[in-house]
Image (cartoon, coloured by chain):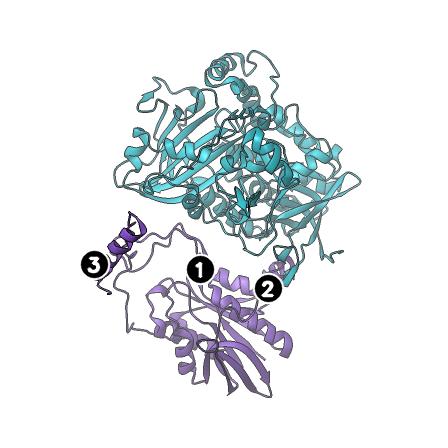
Chain colours: A cyan, B purple
Amino acid sequence: MAVQRETLEADVLIVGGGPAGLACALHLASLIRKHNESGAKPELSAENIYLLEKGREIGANQLSGAVMDPRGLRELVPDFEKTAPLDTPVTDDAAWFFTSSRAWKFPITPPPLRNHGNYVISLSKLTKWLGGLVEKTGVNLFTGFAGSDLILEDGRVCGVITDDKGLDKNGKPKSNYTPGYELRAKVTVLAEGPRGSLTKQLVSRLKLDGLNPQVYSIGVKELWEAPEGRIAPGFVAHTMGWPVPASMYGGGWLYGMQANRVSVGLVIGLEYADPLFDPHEAFQKYKTHPFIRRVLEGGKLVRYGAKTIPAGGWYSMPRPYTDGALIIGDSGSFLDAQKLKGIHMAIKSGMLAAETILDALVKNDASAKMLAAFQERVNASWAKKQLWAVRNFHQGFAHGLVPGLVHAAFQQITGGRGLVDPMRTRAGYEAYAHLDGRKPPAERFKGDGKLTFDRLTDVYHSGTRHDDDEPCHLLVSDTNICIGRCTTEFGNPCQYFCPAAVYEMVDECGERKLKINAANCVHCKTCDIADPYQIITWVPPEGGGGPNYEGM
Amino acid sequence: MNIVVCVKQVPAKDAPLAIPEGAAWIRETDIGFELNEPDGYALEEALRLKEKHGGEVVAVSMGPERSKQAIKEALAKGAERGVHISDDKFYELDPLGSARCLAAAIKREKFDLVLTGLQSDDHGFGQTGVLLAELLGLPHATIIMQIDAADGRLKLKRELEAGWFQWVELPLPAVLSIQSGINKPRYATLKGIMAAKKKEIATLTRAELGVTVSPTQRIERIYVPKKTKKTEILTGTAKEAAAKLVEKLKHEARVL
């Protein structure tokens, strides 16, 4: 059935309302204002910038730890400290090593983990505030609209198709069916966050891959309200060791925020060998460590969330420009994999993209040749310097924690070079080892309901919401693999890596099959990344769906 | 047909609600807000009536600055204008106070019909629409499942209990409370959202409306109900368990 779509034309179309996309919009609107004020031709308008955000409002799908390096934000909004919701400056900052019952403080906080001058923030709140600034400039912010498909004509990106609304679970139109728009733009900016669905399409179709494939970590987080006096606002602890096996990359965090709020979470590199490893369960165990327990016990879980983090760094960066498009933020691998900080770089990449786009609009040329200036701007910026210094960091952990740390120390003294440069890596899912007859656990982690929780309780606290009657947005290309090879080889890791209990292998009338609880999805993209056969494709559900990360 | 539709902004359904100790209302920081779902049905019905009979739809809301978002949503879906009764302390109002403010603002409009949702998802009084009709001196019907308008009169289908319906007729102008589920609300479109930016939202205050209200009721305290449900699993053979169950029903639950 050919769908009749309405068409809209913009100068610039930004897909994604996170720190990168919003920074790009805000900076571009400000450059356009200055351009017009100078009397230069052609006259441009911020109203011809469209920004799509799949979340029901700006900030709804934004999740991070987060300790923010304010460098990017200071460049974007120089007086940000007056109005931005920053929660609290980092006051006490230390790194810890955990055994199952003890915590050892590193005598000196390693330089990459020093956070003096940084802020503990809620990324959701910060982006909501940024969204307000963007809206005032006249930029058209469309919340609840996803970029579903690229418009690619002769290898040139010409815009995107937005999500179809009002389809039932079989893909049939309901009475309020509204087909997606064909949004055409001179420049399309992909700012979709980690593992963007359009970015994935574009990179593979135009072969924009970096030297290394992108590798990811998953971060699982809870926001708590702790009893009075347990933790000071601005207290920041990063931990290594238990419960993450030494063969794996991972670590935890505990941050004190205003009003007894506590951010606690665990990051796990998605390149582990054990297909039955469950990051959510590891995080629940993490909270039972005396160091964490003594803060949280007796408190209340407020919110839960999970999100992937692009950890590949400089060598995993896709070529960030092509005819008619730029890739920024987490989608473009703008994240310091050593510090696990990306907000400042997302903002910077958005600003550099904005500068490039202004030139392209003025010269009315959005060819790859013209947009290559983005790469040059990145190369000349502090973002490159920071990424370059840790360009081999994550790769060093391929053989576990200790070699990784030793290698990191080498890089520290060699300016990022380390032992081998460039150090190659492989996609994380290639690391799974076969089960070889090992049986999956008979029972899943249940939690005590007070300090630790099962996945469904946590999913409830993510505030995630999808229409029950809409097409499944997790496309599995061959479910025969699930019930066949995957069961014997890997024991269906989708049941374990998904932090939102989306995937279940069930027996129905004696027939084993894959059940997808798509409504639970928190949009972390882990399945798209960590599936051993790469047969799961995450596509955006109907706009407005997904988690509600208020305060996260 | 000129239609006024009352829309309220309420805390998002999945918002993590926090109640300060001894407070009479939730802490409003850190939570999201959305259009009251029942009002979404009233809005959709207003838009459909307008599309059939011509005229305009005016969306009226009351609350702090943020509540303008509910009006913007109505404008994006096709309402022509908005009226915002700006009031930071509107949560102190009881239904009569709310209805007085709304009535004062609506009296300034030239309208044939006023639609409200059945109730709000936060306070859930379900009285504002009824009181509004009384204050405006207009006929009123609740739980409306179908509206047929012709020759200045309305034929209305009301939902009763147990699968029963009732048809009533009213003259215009009138006030109706719309039953949730009467229609399937439309989505806002990109064009609608852009057009809404250029639509007018008039702002009024309680003082400008000349409304003074002294609440006739107030909320003493809100709290999360204590969990009192207990589950106990009876062990033993079926016969033993059944015997234990009878004991418990007799002596603990005292229902036998």
- Mark 1 or 3 closer to N-term? 1
2 or 1: mark nearer the eye: 2
- On the image, the x and y values in percent for residue B202 come to 50, 68
Give the distance between the C-alpha atoms of the residues marked 2 and 1, in whole angstroms.
25 Å
Total marks in image: 3
Is residue B123 something one can see in this rendering?
yes
Q: Amino acid at mark 2?
A: Arg
The residue pinned by badge 2 equals B186
Residue B252: give its label: 3
Residue A487: give its label: none
- On the image, the x and y values in percent for residue A450 come to 32, 42
- On the image, the x and y values in percent for residue B58 come to 54, 72
Q: Using the image, determine if residue B160 lies above or below residue A277.
A: below
Q: Using the image, determine if residue A170 lies above or below residue A323.
A: below
Nearest the viewer among A181 and A305 is A305
- Mark 2 or 1 closer to N-term? 1
Q: Secondary structure at mark 3?
A: loop
Q: Residues within 10 Å of mark 1 (few under 14, many from 20)?
A: few
Residue B65: give its label: 1
Give the distance between the C-alpha atoms of the residues marked 2 and 3, in whole angstroms.
52 Å
Q: Amino acid at mark 1?
A: Glu
Return the chain for callout 2: B
